[in-house]
Amino acid sequence: MSEVLRFTVEYESPDETGAIVARVREVPSALSFGYTREEARANVLDALKLMLSPEPGVDATEDTLDVPIAS
C-alpha cells in the first residue's frame, strides 16, 4: 500500500516575458516557472520531487521527518 501526499500548486500571472511562476503552497521553497501552465506545473513538480528525495548516503529505510508548523 502506498501513501499519497496532496499538494496545491499556485500560479502567478505571466510576467512581461510570458513566464508563469508556479509554487507549491505547502512547501514554500518549491517553485519554478514555465511559459505555459503545463510547463510550469511539470517544472515545479520536478523541483518538489528533488526536494523530497533522500540525499545520497542516507538510509532510505529510516523514517525521520521534520515538518514545520505554520503559526
Image (tube, grey):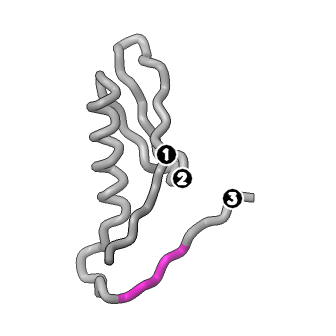
Q: Which residue is drawn at 49% across and 26% down?
A: 12
Q: Is mark 3 on a helix, strand or loop?
A: loop
Q: Do the residues labelled 1 and 2 touch (CB within 8 Å)?
A: yes
Check disc 1 and give the amino acid type.
Thr
Q: Name the residue under label 2.
A: 26
55 lies above or below 12: below
63 lies above or below 53: below
Does residue 62 appear to the left or right of 25 in the view shown? left
Q: What stretch is highlighted in magenta?
A: 62-66
Give the alpha-carbon distance from disc 1 to disc 2, as whole Å. Answer: 7 Å
Location of residue 45 in the rendering, given as x and y in whole percent from the top left corner: 33, 47
Q: Residue at x 42, y 30 (%)?
A: 21
Q: Mark 3 points at which residue?
A: 70
Give the alpha-carbon distance from disc 3 to disc 2, as whole Å. Answer: 10 Å
Does residue 11 appear to the left or right of 18 in the view shown? right
Label for residue 69?
none
Q: Name the residue under label 1.
A: 8
Check disc 2 and give the amino acid type.
Glu
Q: What element carries label 2?
A: loop
Q: Residue at x 29, y 22 (%)?
A: 35
- The single residue placed furthest to the top in the displayed view is 16
1 or 2: mark nearer the eye: 1
